[in-house]
Amino acid sequence: MKLFNKIKKNKTILVLLTATTIFSSCSDYLDVDKDTDDPTVAELNYLLTNIETSVAAIGDFNNNTASLIATYTHQSTSREEEDQYGLQVGNINVNNDWDSIYLVLNDIETLIKQGTESGNLVYVGIAQMQKAYIMSYAVDLWGDVPFSEASQLTAGVVAPKFDNQKEIYTAVFALIETAKTNLASNAGLKKPTVDDIFYGGSTSKWIKFANTLKLKLYNQTRLAADFDQAGFNALIAQNNFFTSNADDFQFARFDVISPTNERNRLFIESYESTQFSSYQSPWMYEILKGMNPNIHTGNPDPRIPYYFYNQLKPGQFPVDQGSATTGNPQADYWDKSTGFFSIRFGSTGPDRDKSAENSYTYPGIFTSGGRYDDGQGGSVATLATKSGTGIAPHRILTYDEFLYIKAELIQVGKLSGSASAALRDAITASFAKVDKVVANNKSPQTIPVLSGASKATTFINNIITEFTAAAAAKQLEIIMTQKWVGTIGDPMDQYTDYRRTGFPILANPLTTGKEYQLNNGDAFPLIDSQTIQNNPFQLSLYWPQSELNSNSNAPAQKNPSTYKIFWDN
């Protein structure tokens, strides 16, 4: 595993290594048996905080896989190898997530052991829930991975076997129930408070998260031949899931850069970078704008200015590379009516690789803690007040996502109820989530509230009208599309959703029809043949080759375009 790269890019690991190092020196000075200034084990509270910081980094932007998966789900685009589904063996961001998972798993096992021995079972339950989360994440990304023999170096296991992915899920389901028992016991003299960054030590919130995560995993496996219907029914009967966005499982970010940068990782990747690595997706933009002829046509989404910040004003000619003489904007993708400027997935156009840093659209206030688009434009590079605060959480599993899961389960017949009502609740909660993120952002801008606004009500009513008139397959597509839109900036679950349902429909350069519908009427239309796709969609990611090379029990490298996760039917 490339520990150096991980440690170099995550200072919290340095803290963790310092806190958990066992010092070999001892002293019999004055017959003292225990040196309290030189502990041999980390305290539970320090372990927990470092674990949660590390867990929050998994699947995030900047140094981890979110940038890659966001391109695979068309929440963003890129010029890098992830374009056209071309991730290669040894991709450093993928390796970073692998290393992050197994580094933090060591510390989770330490916390479980120490908490069990001392009888502090609330700490144990929290650690077990994070183990359940990261191991289900690992299966969803890679399939078979080390589990039963992982983190057993002290027991002499230097080459852990890769366990069957389905068996890992079974163990994760059981682990969640064990964690709930430990959490509900309230046992132990030590109880987490501020050291629990996710829920402040609230066992009731952790149990809600446990149930909601378990429901998500049941939903992902609902097409499996041996689906655990009895377990699913028992979970539904408990009826103890997220009830508001106050229950969201997310990691807060702050406008702090020292001693470590605590801003949103997508904000760091875009606003604080010297050059772009990911770009805003024209495919998602056109769906949000109501331009796609197959879904939500003519129903513009009022979340657009919260999702994207345009440096160009509506009607403003691209300032970097446009030719005022010919009128050619020399843009790979530019909507003159709004100023949205980006590159297309799979583009081979002549303007794809040009530098246009003062024209590109940035991620907005909701996705990154960046700037709300008030239509006034302005270069992020030259106007510091345009950059935003970077205060936006890493959303992992949220209340609105739970409601989309509920809507899906109703629509496919796994739950009783009204799918349209559940969908309305989910979209309404997504709008409320935008307002919540904005309210916490400390932006100096005056930003309108979405919830209850007439444009929001009209949009939601139009979605429900579209849903009611649709056939069953289209209804599922609408649910999954709105879930994809509502969770922009949190692409992992949407990568899973697309693999198991085929929705949302993604831009496809291989089709014969128009891929993008934009027509500026400026005599320089998009040329559809200038988008290509040379690689098949990857159904899982390559295992890190460094792990396969060093682990004698590792399998041969996979073909990610044919290697399916077991729930992918």
Image (cartoon, grey):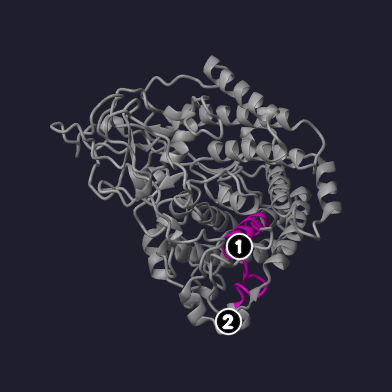
On screen, residue 291 above or below 21: above
**Which of the 4 quarters of the picture holds residue 414?**
top right
The residue at the point 58 percent across, 31 percent down is: 430
The residue that label 2 is drawn on is 159
What is the CA distance from the residue labelled 1 to the residue labelled 2? 19 Å
The residue at the point 54 percent across, 55 percent down is: 55
Q: Secondary structure at mark 2?
A: loop
Magenta residues, dominant SS class:
helix
Query: Where residue 482 appears, x then y in whole percent?
Result: 59, 36
Residue toward you, 73 or 441: 73
Q: Amino acid at mark 2?
A: Ala
Q: Secondary structure at mark 1?
A: helix
On screen, residue 279 above or below 536: above
Query: Where residue 194 appears, x then y in whole percent?
Result: 56, 44
The residue at the point 49 percent across, 25 percent down is: 300
Left or right for 239, reference 138: right
Would residue 37 be visible to someone looking at this image? no
Of marks 1 and 2, the one in the foreground: 2
The residue that label 1 is drawn on is 108
On screen, residue 128 above or below 271: below
Query: Where residue 109 appears, x then y in whole percent?
Result: 63, 66
Disc 1 + disc 2, Cβ < 8 Å? no
Task: Please rate how many residues cluster around mark 1, counting C-alpha atoms within 10 Å: few if below 14, some from 14 to 19, many from 20.
Answer: many
Left or right for 316, reference 256: left
Q: What stretch of residues is rendered in magenta?
A: 127-152
Q: Which mark is residue 531?
A: none
